[in-house]
Amino acid sequence: MNLSSPKTADIALAAPPRVRKPRGRWLGKTGWYTIMVLFGLVTAVPFLWTALMSVRPNSANVFRANQPPEIIPYPGLIGWGEGQRTATQEGSYTALPWDGTLPEGTGLGWWRDYGDQNELLLGTTLSQYAFPATTANYYRVWTDVNLPRYIFNSLVVAFSVVTLQLLTCSLAAYPLAKMRFKGRDTAFYLILATLVFPDQLTLIPTFIMSVNIFGFADTLHGLIIPFGANAFGIFLLRQTYQSIPNEIMESARIDGASEFGIWWRILLPLIRPGLATLAIFSFVGSWNSFLWPLLMLRNEAMFTLPVGLAFLEGAFTGNLRTVAAGVMVATVPIILLFLVFQRQFIRGLSGAVKG
Amino acid sequence: MAANTLLSNEELERGRRARSVRKHITAYGFLAPAFAFLIVFLFIPLIVAIYLSFTRYDLLTSPEWVGFANYETLFQDPLFWQGLRNSFIYLSVTPILIVLSISLAIVVNRRLRGVYIFRTIYYIPAVTSVVAVGMIFEFVFAEPAGLLNGVLTSLGIIDAPINFLTHPNSTLVSIMLVTIWRGIGFYMIVFLAALQSVPEELYEAAALDGANRFQQHWHITVPGIRPSIIFVAIISSISALKVFEEIWVMTDGTAGLLDSALTLMFYLYRQAFTNLEMGYAAAIAVVFSIITVVFSLLNLRYLERNNHEPEQP
């Protein structure tokens, strides 16, 4: 069998209208679903485990000796705001591990203790797997460390980086794709070359300049400006521009439009898919970036979410439930964002790779 | 044009030159903002990095030229070699990731009801930050109350909890598992896009020729998606070489007991930002970059060369 021989290729090309044979019969549908579900569990279980940890009321081990593991949550101490102490005193259990450490407050906020039994589960075999879930860990991580502040900082940085990169990259990619001028190829290869060198090489000089010359330490713009342009983004948008026929620009030029006008009014709307891809990639990149903010920030008020998250463990030594709640707060929004924009995410990724 | 006949050659020439100048001004005007950022934060640092690697510099006093001393020290530094060794061990995530993600892409590249839901789930780790993933796996690996130790103990598989992240022998491997876990979904999507461009007819023809499923994938899928394999090999080996955040988070910034998870990148970080040996760290960065570039070229060469070999012996 030689698959590249013309004979086989002819047969392949001459094949009658695609009759799609159900490939995969050898394993069967059930087999494929089993594989997919198993791998789905490998992906999902670490997240579910973290979610489970984040609603645990106490530090007891989920897996108890000679007893079934406590893996089914039911409503226990639920609420938000101060006044949690009152709730625990009136409630039917006082197993909260940090009694007395929450800020003083009486009746502020809303708390209700649904008790340490659940009617639905009572008497069933499931009840031995159940435990009372609480929102107290979330309230604690939300107030004791300045989680809203970290989220705000991360959002400011990510949106600024996205805006700046969209602007600089879409400007720079236009002449590289559509104009003829001296030095165009040199400029393009310079940009390509930066993709080859790892950013670790520039890390130290960029750090020194940022701290000593630009005074970027402990500022948010210090997390934005060094990422004002993105070589990959220029490369990506150049390809998007190239897919646009020249005639569109020619006719606009005949109508007397300026180059800037053509770019702003005609081309930008046309390269929107490329812009969306770049926006998503630079948003996720900035939102998740860790090393640079770690180096730049000392002042806790300027922390971005990943840095704040990394220091949560220090802030709540031994209280992993609160840390888990922090991890959930940090990851769930970005996962939801992905679920909403998944088409753009995946199409953008495939497009960027295929080039 | 009729109007041109009214102008002298000189005027024509001047007009052409003016247009050309204007064209260049426009083009460079468009390039200017991006290049301003690239020059200040990429091109200049690139040159400065190489200069710094020949100096001793602690941020406080000005850099002092020391020639090749940093490089000489580096090659006698046992921690550098340990970092290099660990970075190369870390590279073994690349072939594992390629095999696993191609397999997974083949699994989800079929028209089954709900297959999109699975693809989406598999991609979720790729959009979760490394820091969060590292912390999630600290919960999974924790001892004795972590998920893995809990499950293994209650199933009676192990008696004593495994010190996934605290024993020198297992720290690096545990962190590599996390990198694989986080990478599979991302590379799966890359391969899925490639798979969908392999013509269906080829498989049918091969099946007619009597090729079994494995042979079909080996002789059609693998050559068909070779550009993506090269892409993933390069991207994932670069990110394996420069792994840092996973290690920082999962060893609480220590690189593990006895520096058991110290990679080259972590060593660079430690020399630069803990010991303030900026010149020495720059030398590490230069060596590191050379390794990375050489490795990418090797990947490209090796996988390209295989491309030209006949597909059937």
Image (spheres, coloured by chain):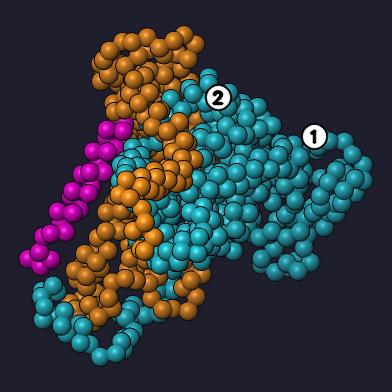
Chain colours: A cyan, B orange
- Circle 1: is it few (<14), some (14-19), or many (20+) Cα within 10 Å? few
Residue B179 — which label? none
User: Residue visible at 47% across and 35% down?
Assistant: B36
Q: Chain of mark 1?
A: A
Q: Quadrant of residue A194?
A: top left
User: Residue visible at 85% across and 54% down?
Assistant: A112
User: Residue visible at 87% across and 48% down?
Assistant: A109
Q: Secondary structure at mark 1?
A: loop
Residue A335 appears at what percent x and percent y? 58, 57
Residue A47 appears at what percent x and percent y? 56, 54
Residue A101 — which label? 1
Same-subunit check for callouts 2 and 1: yes
Residue A332 appears at what percent x and percent y? 62, 54
- The answer to whether residue B310 is magenta is yes
| Horizontal arrangement in the rendering, residue B206 relative to residue A130 (left or right) | left
Residue stretch rendered in magenta on the structure? B288-313
| Horizontal arrangement in the rendering, residue A254 relative to residue B221 (left or right) | right
Q: Which residue is mark 2?
A: A214
- The answer to whether residue B211 is magenta is no
Residue at the farthest bottom position = A16
**Location of residue B106 with respect to A78 vertically, above or below:** below
- Which amino acid type is marked by label 1? Thr
Dot placed on the residue nearer the N-terminal end, 2 or 1: 1
Q: Which quadrant: the C terminus of chain B?
A: bottom left
